[in-house]
Amino acid sequence: MTTSSQQNPDPRGPGRPDGTTPEPARSTRDSSDPTTSGPRSGADLGSETTTANPTPTPTDRSGTDRAVFATVASPYYGYLIALFVGVMLISNVTGTKGVLLFPDLSFELGFLSLDGLVTDGAFLLFPLAYVLGDVISEVYGFKAMRRVVLSGFAVLALAALSFTFTVHLPPAPFYENQDAFEAVAGVIPQFFLAGLAGYVVGELLNSYVLVWMKRRTGEKTLWARLLGSTVVGQLADTIVFCTIAAPALGMVLGSGDYWNYVVIGFVWKTLVEAVLLPVTYVVIAWIKKREPSYQTALAGSTEAGSPLADSRA
């Protein structure tokens, strides 16, 4: 009875011709090799070494007969991005309408003269963007929030470009709302620049301050992080936006109207987020509990005996 040849003790193979780099062991018997001819014994079958490349190369077509998909890293991050960008996009449209709230409310305090609350149509929805920014920054870190801000910037720029292009398209003979569409969707460059600048500066500062505070407190004093980052972010957002947009509204920078515009906007948006603080607490706690990567990081931090730090920030 013919048996197979003696097994090579080195599973990597006998080596390349240069004698320095081992070559992979052959997983199948070469019929042209006389040392491996003949039937295989049971021992040969049990001791035969096989190798496989776990990562297909671009020329590997072995897996093209079935559908493959990438793994979603987080089950909640994508939803938060979509909601955040949606809030920003809607706010930029509704914010084109001037609104006067409480017209009978009137008083003077130094340079601040108040005759009703002058704001815009985004006064209710826009503060939600900072709530979402707090949630993303608290759970996923500054780098994750920075990607969200850049995504929102790209979407807002695309929306402005699309609105401008659509306004200048020739209307159909039956379309009677060209003037109305232009009034609502038409992009005023100065307002667009003000909105984008305030949004980027405010959201990035809000996230940076929150994560900076969290690195020093760990999981404690969440309320301080939320309020502190909101004050810094909203103040920067309001000053940048109002400074760029006020001249387009006929206001003189540094005048009483300008400071009224800044102070009322800042106080209102900050108060709305403060009122929503319990909701923010609930949302953050809910996501932290269900986000697998956060629970893993929290467990590792607890075992190490140190506050949870955002390693991605």
Image: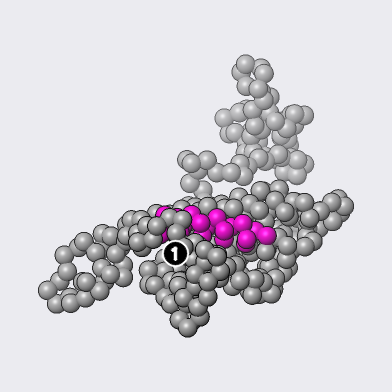
Residue 240 image point, x, y percent? 48, 54
Q: Secondary structure at mark 1?
A: helix
- Residue furthest left as drawn: 173
On the picture, is 289 further left or further right than 123?
right
Span highlighted in magenta in the image: 228-246
Amino acid of disc 1: Asp
- Disc 1 residue crowd, few under 14, some 14–19, many 20+, Cα 10 Å: some
Residue 59 image point, x, y percent? 47, 40
Q: Residue at x 66, y 17 (%)?
A: 19
Judge whether residue 245 is colored magenta: yes
* Vertical order, 311 against 121 (above or below): above
By secondary structure, the bulk of the magenta-drawn segment is best described as helix
Judge whether residue 146 is colored magenta: no
Residue 269 image point, x, y percent? 56, 68
Total numbered badges shown on the rendered structure: 1
| Image quarter of residue 282 | bottom right
Q: Residue at x 67, y 18 (%)?
A: 20
Q: Residue at x 25, y 63 (%)?
A: 166
Residues 74 and 21: in front is 74
Q: Residue at x 75, y 29 (%)?
A: 10
Residue 157 in view here: no
How did the renderer colour the structure? one colour
* Vertical order, 136 against 277 (above or below): above
Quarter of the rendering occupied by the N terminus: top right
Residues 12 and 144: in front is 144
| Image quarter of residue 140 | bottom right
On the picture, is 118 further left or further right than 79?
left
Would you name the residue on which mark 1 appears?
Answer: 257
Residue 64 in view here: yes
- Residue furthest top as drawn: 18
Residue 299 image point, x, y percent? 81, 58
